[in-house]
Image (spheres, rainbow, N blue to C red):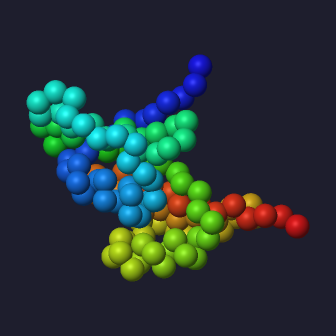
Amino acid sequence: MKFCWSTLMVKNMDESLKFYTEVIGLEIAGRFEAIPGLELAFLGTGDTQIELVCSEESQRSAVGDAVSYGFEVDSLDAALTMVEEKGIPIHSGPFVHPNVKYFFIKDPNGLKIQLKQSIKQI
């Protein structure tokens, strides 16, 4: 069995696509209207993708605090600078541990996004 994607119900497809492409750096693999009133977009070029779903029902969806998406960055300092320049508030952190440093922001739908950098041990 192989994990293929996670689905996120979004309130505004254009706003969410802008966040995931411009802030997170994912590529749009596909975007289409599945049926009238139900738009889908897949992000990412690897084996695992994020599926964004926008519909009238998703307008009423709420993202819980128990879920987050995590993304590896080359430089946490550069990521901090980038989100600050885009006016995205830091939700929590940055935190530093012996092997990793990270912080959290929120996407346009309230989903926690963790940006982390692995610290190489010498």
Residue 30 occupies which quadrant of the picture? top left
At 23% from the left and 54% from the top, the residue drawn is 14
User: In this picture, is 3 found above or below 94?
Assistant: above
At 46% from the left and 45% from the top, the residue drawn is 44
Is residue 112 at all visible to an observer of this figure? no
Residue 46 occupies which quadrant of the picture? top right
Image quadrant for the C terminus?
Answer: bottom right
Q: Is residue 111 left or right of residue 119?
A: left
Residue 17 spot, x, y in % from top left: 31, 53
Image quadrant for the N terminus?
Answer: top right
Is residue 118 at all visible to an observer of this figure? yes
At 17% from the left and 37% from the top, the residue drawn is 55
User: In this picture, is 34 found above or below 22?
Assistant: above
Residue 82 spot, x, y in % from top left: 45, 75
User: In this picture, is 110 found above or below 105?
Assistant: above
User: In this picture, is 65 found above or below 18?
Assistant: above
Q: Is residue 46 left or right of residue 11?
A: right
Residue 116 occupies which quadrant of the picture? bottom right
Residue 83 spot, x, y in % from top left: 42, 72
Residue 21 spot, x, y in % from top left: 39, 58
At 63% from the left and 66% from the top, the residue drawn is 74
Query: Camera-side residue: 66 or 61?
Result: 61
